[in-house]
């Protein structure tokens, strides 16, 4: 089992910045990739950014150039630096950890990000 604890959400004005953190614990050696997803009211959960164990990153088009995903292996923590935030970035952001060996996805509890115009 893997446990994920997120922090760093909040309310920010358009153009501002936030940094989300996600600390992993448990059977973390099985984790192949970690990332962030988001879900706005009435919409499906969508991928924001992912990072593999070997450093390969993937971003949804709408956040490229504004968001950066990074990982501190010593702290078993993944971060999402969000700059130039827009109202359409408003959502609950969820941390994800994926283990290929068991094809299992683990999720954090979610953290609210609200961007005011």
Image (spheres, rainbow, N blue to C red):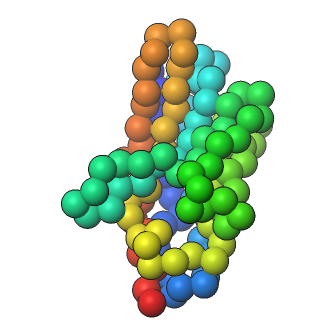
| Number of numbered discs on residues | 0
Which quarter of the rendered picture does the C terminus lie within? Answer: bottom left
Q: Position of residue 15 (x, y in %)?
A: 60, 84
Query: Looking at this rendering, what residue extends furthest in the top direction?
Result: 101
For residue 5, say whether it is visible.
no
Q: Residue at x 51, y 58 (%)?
A: 7
For residue 41, say whether it is visible.
yes
Query: Looking at this rendering, what residue extends furthest in the left direction?
Result: 42
- Residue 47 shown left or right of residue 31 in the figure: left
Taking 60 as reference, is 16 above or below it?
Answer: below
Q: Position of residue 112 (x, y in %)?
A: 39, 65
- Residue 85 shown left or right of residue 94 in the figure: right
Q: Nearer the viewer, residue 47 or 2?
A: 47
Q: Residue at x 47, y 11 (%)?
A: 102
Q: Position of residue 61 (x, y in %)?
A: 59, 56
Q: Residue at x 63, y 77 (%)?
A: 84
């Amino acid at each position: 089992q893997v446990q994920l604890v997120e922090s760093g959400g909040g309310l920010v004005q358009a153009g501002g910045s936030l940094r989300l953190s996600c600390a992993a614990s448990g059977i973390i050696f099985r984790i192949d990739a970690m990332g962030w997803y988001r879900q706005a009211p009435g919409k499906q959960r969508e991928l924001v950014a992912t990072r593999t164990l070997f450093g390969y990153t993937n971003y949804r088009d709408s956040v490229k150039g504004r968001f950066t995903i990074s990982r501190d292996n010593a702290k078993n923590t993944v971060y999402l630096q969000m700059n130039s935030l827009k109202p359409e970035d408003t959502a609950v952001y969820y941390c994800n950890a994926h283990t290929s060996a068991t094809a299992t996805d683990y999720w954090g509890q979610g953290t609210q990000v609200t961007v005011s115009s």
